[in-house]
């Protein structure tokens, strides 16, 4: 299971939903989801109650996805210790909470968003944290505000790119990159269109000198071909309130996401990446892997005891040091 929301954040959300009718929250979250599904955006979040319904339903899953991406950055660069964070299109502050958890080195948090209700909720929730209480949260258009923002060691835009048209998205990417001292993380839903945005932004920023930290083992064009798309998955437990609001029976949900983390300095040795859940049998481990040479299916037989025992523990999205992969 993926990492859960920090206890103090969960408790702060639970305090906020006390007295809120579950059917009202369910109606609001359905209406927000329907808007997203039909190509709309977070402009449908118009009140404090809408913002709370959004946070209740989406924050656990987006937190898990962002946490997995930050984990991949930390794994690729164990020495990375950002001091400052810029959370662009921060909404309820999900990426800020996730980054605070993943990188204890962070001491300054700046958030930007155009939505008043999500900003108010984020500031309320941040009071529950011993480190986020002093975070600054500016309201307005991200690309405009970034022009006068302080640069940060880590810049994150989670689930934002899909809210913008092509030109605005490219402009935002440029504005974010210009404020990135070290690493920029962009996360999108793990749908073909979310992946398409990630691939476009990846190419756009590599052309400006960025280097991929994760998930790719190289800076070349993505080797996946339509209808395939690069995405990952995090399984997380559903709370009782989440099950009630979503009308769900299963006690977990799977959050699919696509992402790219880019840094200013090249990464000396990037691992290959598992692109789907490996198939494990007593005979062999078989996995789809993105390598420096492209996408390959690797089979490690049981008789290769050392590598078999290492690779059988791997999951979709995990990094694999090159030395554990057989040459085909
Ligand atoms: C789907 S929410 C994601 C929120 C948050 N990043 C998360 O991962 O939970 C998208 C957010 O992007 C914000 N947003 C969209 N376009 C924006 C813009 N041009 N400037 C600032 N914020 C924007 C919305 O207001 C909303 O809060």
Image (cartoon, helix red, strand yellow):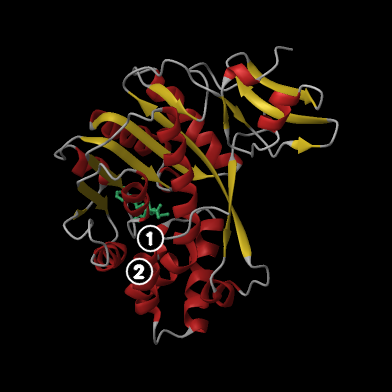
Q: Which residue is mark 2?
A: 46
Q: Secondary structure at mark 2?
A: loop
Cα distance in 3D space between marks 1 and 2? 7 Å
x then y, percent, for residue 249: 68, 72
User: Image quarter for residue 312?
Assistant: top right
- Residue drawn at x 37%, y 72% as measured from the top left: 11
Q: Which residue is mark 1?
A: 43
Compared with residue 156, is residue 290 higher up or lower down, i.e. above or below? above
Disc on res. 272: none
Asked if residue 171 can be seen in this view, the reply is: yes
Q: Nearer the viewer, residue 270 or 89?
A: 270
- Residue drawn at x 60%, y 34% as measured from the top left: 230
Q: Secondary structure at mark 1?
A: helix
Asked if the beta carbon under badge 1 is closer than 8 A to the nearest atom of ligand 1, the reply is yes
**For the view shown, which residue lies furthest in the right direction?**
283
Assess whether mark 2 and mark 1 are in contact (beta carbons under 8 angstroms): yes
x then y, percent, for residue 191: 59, 44
Asked if the beta carbon under badge 2 is closer than 8 A to the nearest atom of ligand 1, the reply is no
- Residue drawn at x 37%, y 68% as measured from the top left: 51
- Looking at the image, residue 318 sits to the left or right of residue 226; the answer is left
Q: Nearer the viewer, residue 30 or 237?
A: 237
């Amino acid at each position: 299971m993926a990492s859960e929301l920090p206890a103090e954040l969960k408790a702060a959300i639970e305090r906020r939903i006390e007295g809120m009718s579950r059917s009202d929250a369910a109606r609001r979250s359905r209406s927000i989801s329907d808007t997203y599904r039909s190509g709309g955006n977070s402009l449908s979040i118009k009140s404090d109650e809408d913002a709370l319904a959004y946070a209740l339903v989406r924050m656990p899953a987006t937190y898990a996805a962002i946490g997995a991406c930050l984990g991949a950055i930390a794994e690729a660069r164990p020495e990375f210790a950002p001091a400052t964070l810029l959370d662009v299109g921060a909404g309820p502050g999900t990426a800020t909470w996730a980054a605070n958890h993943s990188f204890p080195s962070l001491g300054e948090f700046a958030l930007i968003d155009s939505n008043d209700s999500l900003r108010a909720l984020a500031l309320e929730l941040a009071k529950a944290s011993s480190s986020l209480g002093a975070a600054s949260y500016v309201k307005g258009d991200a690309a405009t505000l970034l022009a006068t923002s302080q640069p940060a060691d880590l810049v994150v835009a989670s689930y934002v790119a899909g809210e913008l048209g092509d030109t605005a998205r490219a402009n935002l990417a440029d504005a974010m990159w210009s404020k990135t001292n070290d690493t920029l993380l962009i996360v999108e839903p793990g749908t073909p269109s979310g992946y398409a945005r990630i691939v476009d932004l990846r190419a756009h920023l590599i052309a400006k000198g960025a280097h991929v930290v994760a998930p790719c083992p190289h800076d070349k064009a993505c080797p996946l071909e339509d209808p395939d798309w690069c995405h990952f998955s995090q399984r997380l437990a559903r709370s009782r309130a989440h099950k009630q609001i979503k009308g769900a029976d299963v006690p977990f949900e799977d959050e699919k996401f696509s992402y790219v983390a880019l840094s200013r300095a090249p990464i000396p040795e990037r691992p290959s990446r598992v692109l789907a859940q490996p198939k494990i049998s007593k005979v062999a481990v078989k996995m789809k892997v993105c390598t420096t040479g492209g996408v390959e299916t690797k089979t490690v037989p049981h008789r290769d005891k050392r590598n078999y025992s290492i690779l059988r523990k791997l999951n979709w999205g995990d990094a694999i040091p090159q030395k554990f992969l057989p040459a085909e």
